Image (cartoon, helix red, strand yellow):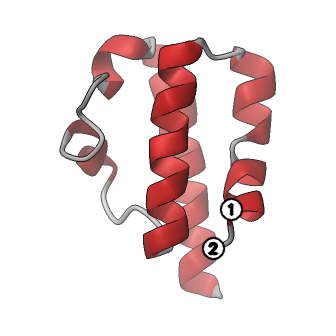
Amino acid sequence: MDRDAAYASFSTFIAEERPNAEQIYFIEQVVDYVVENGYINNVLDLMKAPFDRPYKFSTIFTREEQIKFVNVINSIKSNALVA
């Protein structure tokens, strides 16, 4: 997946949730990973390296934001597997 497409996948989330600096950093980590690997296979990986530093997913996003974020991750994976 190219970087623009990866950021486009998060555009609605970013527009609606208006993430803070820590959350933007986390999103950028995920985008870098997706650009490199195509998708995140298991959303539980968001709790592991390289995503657990310096900010943990479970502490920087509310439960509602986590659900929306996971939906984006699952959508990226679904689109990648169809392609």
Q: Residues within 10 Å of mark 1 (few under 14, many from 20)?
A: some
Q: Are marks 1 and 2 in contact (CB under 8 Å)?
A: no
Disc 1 from disc 2: Cα separation: 7 Å
The reply, left or right, for residue 61 in relation to residue 2 is: left
Q: Which quadrant is the N terminus positioned in?
A: bottom right
Q: Is residue 67 visible?
A: no
Residue tagged by mark 1?
3
Q: Is residue 74 above or below residue 53?
A: below
Q: Residue at x 19, y 46 (%)?
A: 49
Residue 75 percent location from the top left of the image: 60, 58
Which residue is farthest bottom? 83
Which residue is farthest left? 48
Q: Is residue 10 above or below residue 80?
A: above
Q: Residue at x 51, y 22 (%)?
A: 23
Q: Residues within 10 Å of mark 2 (few under 14, many from 20)?
A: some
Residue 51 percent location from the top left of the image: 30, 40
Q: Residue at x 45, y 44 (%)?
A: 29
Residue 5 percent location from the top left of the image: 75, 62
Residue tagged by mark 2?
1
Residue 48 percent location from the top left of the image: 18, 43
SS at mark 1?
helix
Q: Is residue 52 visible?
A: yes
The reply, left or right, for residue 11 in relation to residue 26 is: right
Q: Tell me which amino acid carries mark 1.
A: Arg
The reply, left or right, for residue 42 in relation to residue 77 is: left
Q: Disc 1 vs disc 2: which is toward the camera?
A: 1
- Residue nearest the viewer, comparing 26 with 70: 26
Q: Which quadrant is the C terminus positioned in?
A: bottom right
SS at mark 2?
loop
